[in-house]
Image (cartoon, rainbow, N blue to C red):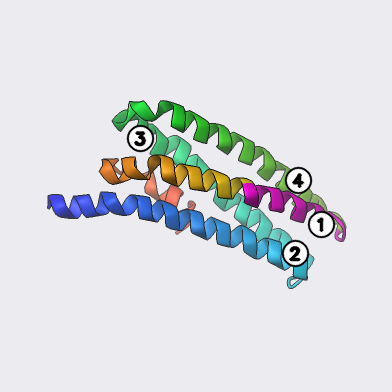
């Protein structure tokens, strides 16, 4: 039994990495679609808003669930977690701008979509740095054992079924 529990815990760092990879894929797909205009404006806006919701859900799950549990188990990671939460705030600000631009794009079309592309380019760079740091900083702690207190759905599945 302990072995299976250990396997589950060890899998958490891998699941975190896979969740980050999926979010990278989503933002890159939208950026590519914007550049190539492969989708209608409405479809691009819809995909963009869905991505914003997914990333927001992921970070809320980390802030409210994973990080709280991690700090109970590993209080020595307080400064690391504080830095990650600060990053989440910065990313939330960018996502708010993206949502605002997407709302305007849905109403006006055209050049507003270019503004979304610029924001997503910057966001993708920040996400890459943030995800890399997060994975390096907390993967060992996840592998060492952080109980799953129902935080995994939002973190790994972005609040969707």
Q: Earlier in the sequence, mark 1 or mark 2?
A: 2
User: Is 118 included in the stretch rendered in magenta?
Assistant: yes
Given contact means CB atoms under 8 Å apart, are the residues at marks 1 and 3 in contact? Answer: no
Give the CA distance from mark 4 to mark 1. 13 Å
Q: Which type of secondary structure does the marked residue at label 2 adopt? A: helix
- Residue bearing the label numbered 3: 70
Residues under numbered marks 4 and 2 in contact, where contact means CB atoms less than 8 Å apart? no
**Position of 140 relative to 23 (above/below):** above
For label 4, the residue is: 100
Q: Tell me where residue 113 sits by quadrant.
A: bottom right
| Nearer to us in this view, 111 or 79 | 79
User: Would residue 43 be found to the left or right of residue 25 on screen?
Assistant: right
Residue contact between numbered discs 1 and 2, judged by CB atoms under 8 Å: yes
Q: What range of the chain is rendered magenta?
A: 109-125
Query: Which residue appears at 44% of the width and 59% of the height?
Result: 161
Q: Does the image show residue 109?
A: yes
Task: Report helix, strand or loop for mark 1.
Answer: helix
What separation in Å lies between label 1 and label 3 (alpha carbons)? Answer: 39 Å
Q: Name the residue under label 1.
A: 114
Indicate which disc, 3 or 4, sits on the residue closer to the N terminus: 3
Along the polypeptide, which appears first: circle 3 or circle 2? Answer: 2
Q: Residues within 10 Å of mark 2 (few under 14, many from 20)?
A: many
Residue found farthest to the bottom: 38
Residue drawn where x is 28% and y is 51% of the image: 10
Q: Is mark 4 on a helix, strand or loop?
A: helix
SS at mark 3 in the image = helix
Query: Within 10 Å of the Cα at label 4, are there few (<14), some (14-19), or many (20+) other Cα atoms?
Result: few
Q: Which of marks 1 and 3 is nearer the N terminus?
A: 3
């Amino acid at each position: 039994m302990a072995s299976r529990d250990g396997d589950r815990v060890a899998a958490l760092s891998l699941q975190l990495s896979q969740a980050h990879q999926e979010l990278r894929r989503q933002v890159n797909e939208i950026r590519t679609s914007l550049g190539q205009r492969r989708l209608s404006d409405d479809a691009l806006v819809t995909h963009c808003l869905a991505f914003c919701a997914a990333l927001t859900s992921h970070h809320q799950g980390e802030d409210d669930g994973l990080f709280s549990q991690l700090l109970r188990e590993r209080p020595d990671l307080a400064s690391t977690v504080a830095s990650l939460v600060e990053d989440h705030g910065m990313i939330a600000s960018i996502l708010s701008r993206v949502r605002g631009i997407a709302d305007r794009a849905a109403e006006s079309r055209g050049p507003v979509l270019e503004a979304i592309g610029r924001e997503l380019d910057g966001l993708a760079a920040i996400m890459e740095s943030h995800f890399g740091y997060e994975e390096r900083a907390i993967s060992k702690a996840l592998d060492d054992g952080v109980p799953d207190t129902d935080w995994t759905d939002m973190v790994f599945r972005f609040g969707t079924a």
